[in-house]
Image (tube, helix red, strand yellow):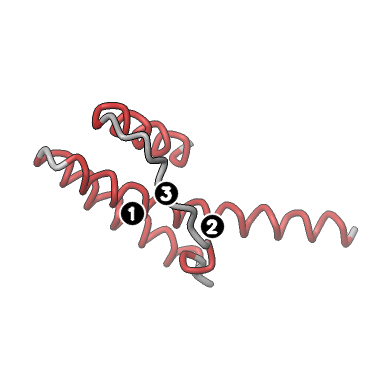
Amino acid sequence: MAYLNLEKSIAFIRLDLDEENPGRFVKLKRYAVPDERQALKFALDNLRKGADSFALGDFRQSLKWLRESRNYLRALLRAKRLRRARLTRAL
């Protein structure tokens, strides 16, 4: 649910900025962290920075931080999904 809300926030900011650029394709390896708690901490730190930038009215910087946060969450969710698929295949 948090990931979905973050994606919506990014879409609304992009809409407000009239930014057609969807961002860059990112390599998730950069955001893959072996410890889930560490990945969540990075995502939360970037989310806070994005919220602070948003409160200051710096929407472009906010968009940057929110995208970073989303990427950590995306990498974490992808790793969980792959683990679950491997376990299912092993059974």
Q: Residue under circle 2? A: 76
Q: Residue, x 87% and y 57% (percent of image)?
A: 89
Do the CB atoms of the residues marked 2 and 3 lie less than 8 Å apart? no
State which quarter of the image contains the C terminus: bottom right
Answer left or right for 37 relative to 29: left
Q: Nearer the viewer, mark 2 or mark 3?
A: 3
Give the Cα separation between the discs numbered 2 and 3. Answer: 10 Å
Give the Cα separation between the discs numbered 3 and 1. Answer: 10 Å
Figure check: 67 above or below 13: below
Q: Nearer the viewer, residue 68 or 5?
A: 68
Task: Name, please, the residue furthest toward the bottom.
Answer: 34
Where is residue 68, by image quadrant?
A: bottom left
Figure check: 65 above or below 34: above
Q: Residue, x 83% and y 54% (percent of image)?
A: 88
Answer left or right for 25 relative to 44: right
Give the mark nearest the N terminus, 2 or 1.
1
Q: Nearer the viewer, residue 50 or 48?
A: 50
Q: Position of residue 10 (x, y in %)?
A: 35, 37
Q: Secondary structure at mark 1?
A: helix
Identify which amino acid the numbered label 1 is placed on.
Leu
Q: Position of residue 28 (x, y in %)?
A: 53, 61
Identify which amino acid the numbered label 3 is placed on.
Arg
Q: Residue under circle 1? A: 44
- Residue 8's tag is none
Identify which amino acid the numbered label 2 is placed on.
Leu
Give the mark nearest the N terminus, 3 or 1.
1
Give the Cα separation between the discs numbered 2 and 1. Answer: 13 Å
Q: Secondary structure at mark 2?
A: helix
Q: Position of residue 85 (x, y in %)?
A: 77, 54
Q: Residue under circle 3? A: 70
